[in-house]
Amino acid sequence: MKKIKKIVLAYSGGLDTSVILHWLKEKYKAQVITYTANLGQGERLEAIKEKAKKTGASKVYIEDVRREFCQNYVFPALKAGALYEGKYPLATALARPLITRGLVKIAEKEGAEAIAHGCTGKGNDQVRFEVTAKALNPEITILAPVREWELSSREEEIKYAQEHKIPVEISKESPYSIDRNLWGVSIECGSLEDIWKQPPSDSYQITKSPQEAPDEPAYLKIEFEKGIPSGLNGKEYDPVTLIEKLNLIGGVNGVGRIDLLENRLIGIKSREIYEAPAAVILHLAHKELERLTLDKDTFHFKELIAQKYSELIYNGLWYSPLREALDEFITQTQKVVTGEIKLMIYKGNCEVVGRKSSYSLYKRRIATYGPEDIFDQKASTGFIYIWGLPLKIMAKVKRGDK
Ligand code: ARG
């Protein structure tokens, strides 16, 4: 085995990764460099920096990747219509390849032999980190302390932290495991493991319940340019601000809560709740604009692509040739996905109430039942004769007709 002298650790500042930092130093007698990506998790990153240093990091990296996250991960997934098992907008899953890229980049720059993460052996994230790392640097060693160490509970980790004077704020730790970024919050563990029980209100981080939401509906007008959201209520916004605004408005109105019993890659069924107001709103609006601007065949075919694309993200295959090839297809389809969608949000619901586009394939004079109708109804007779001909012949044969 090659000697490990430097390790780059994906560090969140929570209990697990703090204990890991110390544990790695002891076990490998190596320097541990921490890497924290700012993905809009709403935490004070300065405090994380201090904590990492106090816990013994030889160097601390904090990188603001919010814009890149939106442009290169979130928006491609939005354009693809990627919702895992039809519901989960993939916030956690999309962030993993970006974090791993950061880890590998720093490992190469610092001459580190290994990278490390704090995932358990039961989840999807370990797969995403490690498969991505292999794709980016096939030589790099990947360490997953939680899969091999002797600490088997949170209590033991807390004891370890206290014994080794690792600064952790235990009182602040919630009973849930929470992963948050701009695209959404993923919440599991604690009482959520009882799948018959409604999630308690304290499990939700950024959304109000429908009962607490305002009694008046809110209206949103979202503009898209080639499939990418670019404006809200007549004003242009950069991707990060736009998503933040939608999370806020949606969250206050109780939009974006998802309770999903999902199939993990590792073969376990698990229950996770998600809060993704911006993602829910944008997916709905984007799909509506596609209904208006894409021809039927492309629209239907894209549904198949969406499912495959969501599976690639969920299963850690972001850096795969298939994902890249699908992106080419999707980009081609988005050339006409420019226009505006009007939504009403009210007490947990989000509904499309209007749509427009200069690429609109909806033509009122063709669709109308009013006097301006220009559709030639007689033409349908011939169409139906030919469309129904095979079935008609089969029915005759069945009856024994000549
Ligand atoms: N089930 C989600 C996924 O696999 C989220 C995983 C992380 N969840 C968490 N609460 N830490 O993408």
Image (tube, helix red, strand yellow):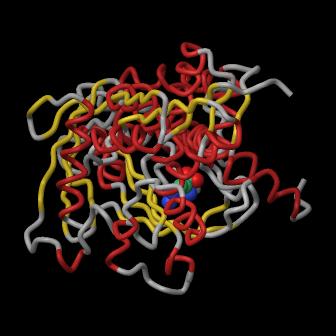
The quarter in which the N terminus is drawn is: top right
In the image, residue 208 above or below residue 301: below
Residue at left 27%, top 45%?
44
In the image, residue 261 above or below residue 256: below
Image quadrant of residue 113? top right
Front residue (pair 55, 369): 55
Rendered location of residue 25, percent (x, y): 61, 39
The answer to whether residue 81 is left or right of residue 397 is left
Rendered location of residue 301, percent (x, y): 58, 37
Image quadrant of residue 36? top left
Q: Does the image show residue 84?
A: no
Question: Which image quarter has ligand 1?
Answer: bottom right
Image quadrant of residue 51? top left
Front residue (pair 11, 232): 11
Residue at left 55%, top 28%?
103
Front residue (pair 120, 158): 158
Q: Does the image show residue 395?
A: yes
In the image, residue 117 above or below residue 109: below
Residue at left 53%, top 55%?
164
Rendered location of residue 231, percent (x, y): 18, 33
Residue at left 20%, top 61%?
345
Rendered location of residue 95, percent (x, y): 48, 39
Farthest-out residue, bottom: 196
How many marks the image carries: the answer is 0
